[in-house]
């Protein structure tokens, strides 16, 4: 079979590996298990993806971990994985083609009112219109609004297209969560953001990316709760990982929407580009 299979013992050691696993992992089986983390070895089936560095470039391994009984009655796990790097690359090319069409559409929308506003100003000036000053002010304001919209579109697409993060540094996550909370003051108490975290959570991460992700999730929660309710940002340590959770009191995600959350341009809101969660996922990856 083309899929790699590992049998893992209770001590998280490799008991057995099939030829496909040896071919896919080479001498990196230990690194593969480290990247999986201890949290996946539980008493239920877990599905995940692991990016594994290799001399020929990073490979993405789609992985399923399932508890099993080993000979002799010992508990263990069956790890089945496959290399989906080419498949994901093909899907990414398709996505980029869709993005290119959508960029053209998104940019075209603001350009039309900008052009009309400019023509209105020129016509009013040529006619020496009695309301020339007012017409100029109104149409310049329209141009400024549309330019701001174009700038937002450009910013969103630039974030979506990033291949790497250049600002990785040592951060104190607790301080970052407090910074997110400070962005949402609540003088009337209708919408509040709380922080529950260990005082020291050092992480190696991109500050700007985490701020973008967390504020996007808090903003989504605020809108889902109609700006009334509480969001709690939680930080904790689980094995060697720092876990960040965003809890809200909203209605939850409808079943028919859940599978489309990370689909570009899909949105349940009438505003925005429909790229917020797609960008968040891209930054996390």
Image (cartoon, grey):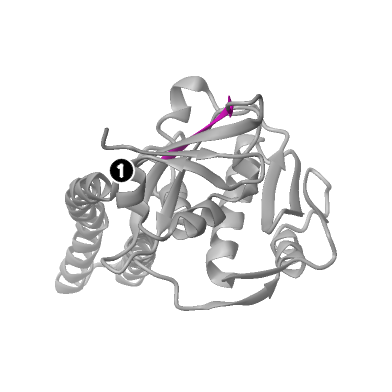
Residue in the image at 46% along x and 60% along y: 283
Image-based side of 23 in relation to 93, left or right: right
- In this picture, is 23 found above or below 76? below
* Most foreground residue, 241 or 186: 241
Task: Count the numbered circles shown.
Answer: 1
On the image, the x and y values in percent for residue 117 come to 24, 62
Image-based side of 207 in relation to 108, left or right: right
Q: Is residue 275 magenta?
A: no
* Most foreground residue, 72 or 227: 72
Please tell me whether the stretch drawn in magenta is mainly helix, strand or loop.
strand
The image quadrant that residue 181 belongs to is: bottom right
Residue in the image at 27% along x and 57% along y: 110
Residue extending furthest toward the front: 72
Image-based side of 242 in relation to 208, left or right: right
On the image, the x and y values in percent for residue 121 come to 23, 68
* Most foreground residue, 98 or 174: 174
Q: Quadrant location of the N terminus?
A: top left
Q: Quadrant location of the C terminus?
A: bottom left
Q: Which residue is mark 1?
A: 20
The image quadrant that residue 19 belongs to is: top left
Q: Is residue 66 magenta?
A: yes
Residue 270 in view (yes/no) = no
Task: Report crowding for label 1: few under 14, some 14 to 19, many 20 or more residues within 10 A (C-alpha).
Answer: some
Region in magenta: 63-70
On the image, the x and y values in percent for residue 217 come to 59, 48
Residue 9 in view (yes/no) = yes
On the image, the x and y values in percent for residue 134 come to 37, 67
- In this picture, is 43 found above or below 90? above
For label 1, the SS is: helix
């Amino acid at each position: 079979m083309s899929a790699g299979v590992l049998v893992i013992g209770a001590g998280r050691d490799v008991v057995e590996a099939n030829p496909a696993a040896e071919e896919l992992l080479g001498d990196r089986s230990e690194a593969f298990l480290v990247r999986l983390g201890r949290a996946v070895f539980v008493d239920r089936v877990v599905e995940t993806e692991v990016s594994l560095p290799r001399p020929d470039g990073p490979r993405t391994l789609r992985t399923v971990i399932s508890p099993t009984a080993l000979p002799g009655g010992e508990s263990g796990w069956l790890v089945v994985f496959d290399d989906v790097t080419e498949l994901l690359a093909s899907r990414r090319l398709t996505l980029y083609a869709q993005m290119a069409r959508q960029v053209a559409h998104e940019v075209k929308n603001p350009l039309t009112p900008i052009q009309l506003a400019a023509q209105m100003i020129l016509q009013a000036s040529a006619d020496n219109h009695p309301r020339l000053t007012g017409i100029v002010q109104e149409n310049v304001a329209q141009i400024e609004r549309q330019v701001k919209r174009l700038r937002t579109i450009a910013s969103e697409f630039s974030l979506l297209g990033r291949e790497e993060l250049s600002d990785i540094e040592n951060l104190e996550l607790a301080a970052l969560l407090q910074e997110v909370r400070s962005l949402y003051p609540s003088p009337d108490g209708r919408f509040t953001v709380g922080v529950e975290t260990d005082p020291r959570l050092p992480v190696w991460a991109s500050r700007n990316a985490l701020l973008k992700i967390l504020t996007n999730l808090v903003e989504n929660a605020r809108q889902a709760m109609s700006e009334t309710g509480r969001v709690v940002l939680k930080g904790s340590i689980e094995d060697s990982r720092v876990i960040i959770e965003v809890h809200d009191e909203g209605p939850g995600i409808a079943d028919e929407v859940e599978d489309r959350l990370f689909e570009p341009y899909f949105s349940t809101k009438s505003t925005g580009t429909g790229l917020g969660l797609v960008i968040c996922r891209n930054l996390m990856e």
